[in-house]
Image (tube, grey):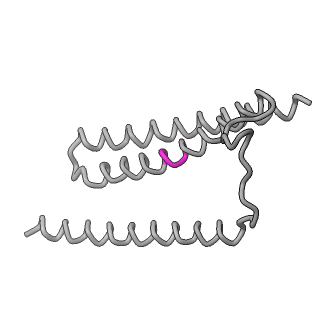
Amino acid sequence: MDHQRYVKRFLSSVRLGTFVSVAFFIGFVVVSVAFADDALPTSGIGGLPFASKSPTGSITALIKQVVLYTGIFAVVSLTWGGFLFITAFGEDEKVKKGKNIVKFSLIGVLLSISAYAIVDVVNRLAV
Protein backbone atom coordinates (compact mmCIF):
# COMPACT_ATOMS: atom_id res chain seq x y z
CA MET A 1 0.00 0.00 0.00
CA ASP A 2 2.77 2.41 0.94
CA HIS A 3 4.66 1.45 -2.22
CA GLN A 4 1.69 2.45 -4.43
CA ARG A 5 1.54 5.88 -2.83
CA TYR A 6 5.26 6.33 -3.40
CA VAL A 7 4.94 5.32 -7.07
CA LYS A 8 2.03 7.74 -7.59
CA ARG A 9 4.05 10.56 -6.07
CA PHE A 10 7.03 9.62 -8.23
CA LEU A 11 4.94 9.55 -11.41
CA SER A 12 3.47 12.97 -10.63
CA SER A 13 6.98 14.39 -10.23
CA VAL A 14 8.01 12.73 -13.51
CA ARG A 15 5.02 14.33 -15.24
CA LEU A 16 5.96 17.71 -13.81
CA GLY A 17 9.58 17.27 -14.87
CA THR A 18 8.50 16.25 -18.36
CA PHE A 19 6.23 19.29 -18.61
CA VAL A 20 9.00 21.64 -17.49
CA SER A 21 11.49 20.03 -19.91
CA VAL A 22 9.08 20.35 -22.83
CA ALA A 23 8.32 23.97 -21.88
CA PHE A 24 12.05 24.81 -21.82
CA PHE A 25 12.58 23.06 -25.15
CA ILE A 26 9.71 24.96 -26.76
CA GLY A 27 11.05 28.18 -25.25
CA PHE A 28 14.50 27.55 -26.68
CA VAL A 29 13.04 26.74 -30.09
CA VAL A 30 10.94 29.92 -30.06
CA VAL A 31 13.93 32.05 -29.06
CA SER A 32 16.20 30.45 -31.66
CA VAL A 33 13.59 30.98 -34.38
CA ALA A 34 13.06 34.57 -33.28
CA PHE A 35 16.77 35.37 -33.46
CA ALA A 36 17.51 33.20 -36.50
CA ASP A 37 19.30 34.74 -39.45
CA ASP A 38 17.54 34.59 -42.80
CA ALA A 39 20.72 33.69 -44.66
CA LEU A 40 21.69 30.07 -44.98
CA PRO A 41 25.10 29.16 -43.56
CA THR A 42 27.85 28.99 -46.12
CA SER A 43 30.04 25.97 -46.35
CA GLY A 44 33.76 25.82 -46.96
CA ILE A 45 35.63 24.99 -50.11
CA GLY A 46 33.78 22.63 -52.44
CA GLY A 47 30.82 22.32 -50.08
CA LEU A 48 32.82 20.60 -47.34
CA PRO A 49 31.80 21.86 -43.90
CA PHE A 50 35.30 21.94 -42.37
CA ALA A 51 37.25 22.99 -45.45
CA SER A 52 38.83 26.42 -45.27
CA LYS A 53 41.59 28.33 -46.99
CA SER A 54 43.63 28.35 -43.80
CA PRO A 55 44.39 25.36 -41.57
CA THR A 56 43.39 27.30 -38.46
CA GLY A 57 39.96 27.97 -39.95
CA SER A 58 39.40 24.26 -40.49
CA ILE A 59 40.56 23.39 -36.98
CA THR A 60 38.38 26.11 -35.47
CA ALA A 61 35.34 24.93 -37.41
CA LEU A 62 36.00 21.33 -36.35
CA ILE A 63 36.37 22.25 -32.67
CA LYS A 64 33.18 24.33 -32.80
CA GLN A 65 31.32 21.33 -34.20
CA VAL A 66 32.80 19.04 -31.55
CA VAL A 67 31.69 21.45 -28.82
CA LEU A 68 28.20 21.54 -30.33
CA TYR A 69 27.90 17.76 -30.37
CA THR A 70 29.44 17.55 -26.89
CA GLY A 71 26.72 19.87 -25.64
CA ILE A 72 24.02 17.73 -27.22
CA PHE A 73 25.57 14.57 -25.76
CA ALA A 74 25.90 16.28 -22.37
CA VAL A 75 22.20 17.11 -22.26
CA VAL A 76 21.34 13.51 -23.11
CA SER A 77 23.78 12.06 -20.58
CA LEU A 78 22.68 14.50 -17.85
CA THR A 79 19.09 13.49 -18.48
CA TRP A 80 20.00 9.80 -18.36
CA GLY A 81 22.04 10.21 -15.18
CA GLY A 82 19.22 12.18 -13.55
CA PHE A 83 16.72 9.52 -14.58
CA LEU A 84 18.89 6.78 -13.10
CA PHE A 85 19.33 8.81 -9.92
CA ILE A 86 15.59 9.42 -9.57
CA THR A 87 14.58 5.84 -10.31
CA ALA A 88 17.19 4.32 -7.99
CA PHE A 89 14.62 4.04 -5.14
CA GLY A 90 17.39 4.19 -2.56
CA GLU A 91 19.62 1.48 -4.03
CA ASP A 92 23.14 2.65 -3.32
CA GLU A 93 24.67 1.21 -6.49
CA LYS A 94 22.18 2.90 -8.81
CA VAL A 95 22.43 6.19 -6.94
CA LYS A 96 26.20 6.09 -7.27
CA LYS A 97 25.96 5.24 -10.98
CA GLY A 98 23.57 8.14 -11.63
CA LYS A 99 25.77 10.57 -9.70
CA ASN A 100 28.86 9.42 -11.62
CA ILE A 101 27.15 9.89 -14.98
CA VAL A 102 26.09 13.41 -14.04
CA LYS A 103 29.52 14.25 -12.63
CA PHE A 104 31.48 13.01 -15.63
CA SER A 105 29.15 14.62 -18.15
CA LEU A 106 29.59 17.97 -16.39
CA ILE A 107 33.37 17.48 -16.44
CA GLY A 108 33.17 16.75 -20.17
CA VAL A 109 31.17 19.90 -20.78
CA LEU A 110 33.68 21.99 -18.84
CA LEU A 111 36.57 20.48 -20.81
CA SER A 112 34.90 21.10 -24.17
CA ILE A 113 34.00 24.69 -23.25
CA SER A 114 37.56 25.37 -22.12
CA ALA A 115 38.92 23.84 -25.35
CA TYR A 116 36.64 26.14 -27.33
CA ALA A 117 37.74 29.14 -25.24
CA ILE A 118 41.42 28.34 -25.74
CA VAL A 119 41.00 27.98 -29.51
CA ASP A 120 38.98 31.18 -29.66
CA VAL A 121 41.60 33.13 -27.70
CA VAL A 122 44.44 31.76 -29.84
CA ASN A 123 42.58 32.66 -33.05
CA ARG A 124 41.96 36.20 -31.83
CA LEU A 125 45.63 36.63 -30.95
CA ALA A 126 46.85 35.39 -34.34
CA VAL A 127 46.49 38.23 -36.80
Residue 62 x, y percent position in the rendering: 65, 35
Residue at horizontal 19 percent and vertical 66 percent from the top: 6
Query: Is 54 on the left or on the right of 36, as rendered?
Result: right
Number of marks drawn:
0
Residue 102 x, y percent position in the rendering: 42, 43
Residue at horizontal 67 percent and vertical 37 percent from the top: 50
Query: Is 17 on the left or on the right of 29, as rendered?
Result: left
Residue 78 x, y percent position in the rendering: 43, 48
- Of residues 82 and 89, which is closer to you in this image? 82
Magenta: predominant secondary structure element? Answer: helix
Q: In this view, does 46 lie above or below 35?
A: above
Task: Look at the image and say whether residue 73 sits in the magenta stretch.
Answer: yes
Write down the region rendered in magenta.
70-74
Residue 69 x, y percent position in the rendering: 54, 44
Query: Is 118 on the left or on the right of 73, as rendered?
Result: right
Task: Look at the image and say whether residue 124 sits in the magenta stretch.
Answer: no
Quadrant including the N terminus: bottom left
- Of residues 88 and 36, which is closer to you in this image? 36
Q: Indicate the quadrant where residue 112 lies.
A: top right
